[in-house]
Image (cartoon, rainbow, N blue to C red):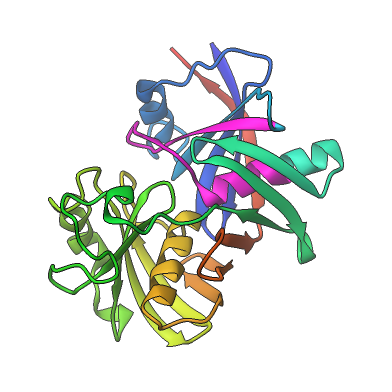
Amino acid sequence: MTLPFVKMHAHGDDFIIVDRRGLDDPITAQVARRLGNRHTGIGFNQLAVVLDCEDALARIKFWNPNGTPLQTCGSATRGVADRLMHETGRDTIVLRTDRGLLTCVRAAGQQVSVDMGAPSLDWSGVPLADALDTRTLPIDGAPAACSMGNPHCTYFIDDISTIDVAAVGPALETHPLFPANTNVHFVQVLDRSHIRLRIWERGGGVPLGSGSCCCGAVVNGIRRGLLDATVQVQCDGGTVTVQWDGQGGVVLTGRVEQIMQGTAYLL
């Protein structure tokens, strides 16, 4: 069986899109792992499968390269939105993910914005193993936690260059406090509207960027009183804008770019 795909990236966060509208969905955990291998597959941070949907323009299912599913992905959602906006001629569309209905809007400079929904701030919504204040966790480094449909743990540090993300990330991802494991962020606050962010991504390692991680990092920074409502987030692969008023949905805005299209072979 052959599987057409498109590969895109958003600030270095690479993903592939498989459009299966009107067709079956052949993606399983095993298939996602094969396609996600950067040596013997295509390689990606996330795989987005586009499916038919009754109450939105399309439904998206997401996979990590290790074959685990995830509820949402800010970068791949914006990539799918960009393609469907070109296809339909619309500047605003609604997509369904396991996190719910997400509204996507064409922004200035061919950017795409997505309202990622309100963050989950209670310990049970992250989730944590214990009933704790998620603004300051009682573990080394006193990080903050939230969920954007996937768990996020944010460390605020003075000098991000001192952190070996690949060395410390795996143990923090699987810390017993996070029963579903967690994404891990390291944030250096440059000023109240600008941060430098490096990431250990749950199930994916060290990416150049991550839309949902950018959102989680800003949410936790605002909750700590460190950031204003609109923040430029500088990742290894580029910069995106995150907006949150402390009450409603978190809006992620940035460019998405197509890299290639092709056909994968499924044995």
- x then y, percent, for residue 178: 21, 50
- x then y, percent, for residue 155: 28, 72
Q: How many marks?
A: 0
Check residue 73 for magenta coloring.
Answer: yes
Check residue 112 for magenta coloring.
Answer: no
Residue 193 located left or right of residue 106:
left
Q: Nearer the viewer, residue 139 or 198?
A: 139
What residue lies at 41% left-to-right and 83% top-to-bottom? 226
**Residue 143, quarter of the rendered image:** bottom left
- Image quadrant occupied by the C terminus: top left
Residue 47 located left or right of residue 24:
left
Q: Nearer the viewer, residue 122 or 144?
A: 122
- x then y, percent, for residue 245: 56, 71
Q: Residue furthest bottom?
A: 191
Asked if residue 5 can be seen in this view, the reply is: no
The stretch in magenta equals: 58-82
For residue 177, above or below residue 86:
below
**Residue 137, quarter of the rendered image:** bottom left
What residue lies at 57% left-to-right and 33% top-to-bottom? 60
For residue 157, above or below residue 146:
below
**Residue 160, quarter of the rendered image:** bottom left
What residue lies at 46% left-to-right and 81% top-to-bottom? 227
Q: Nearer the viewer, residue 150 or 200?
A: 150
What residue lies at 50% left-to-right and 16% top-to-bottom? 26
Asked if residue 16 can be seen in this view, the reply is: yes
- x then y, percent, for residue 234: 50, 73
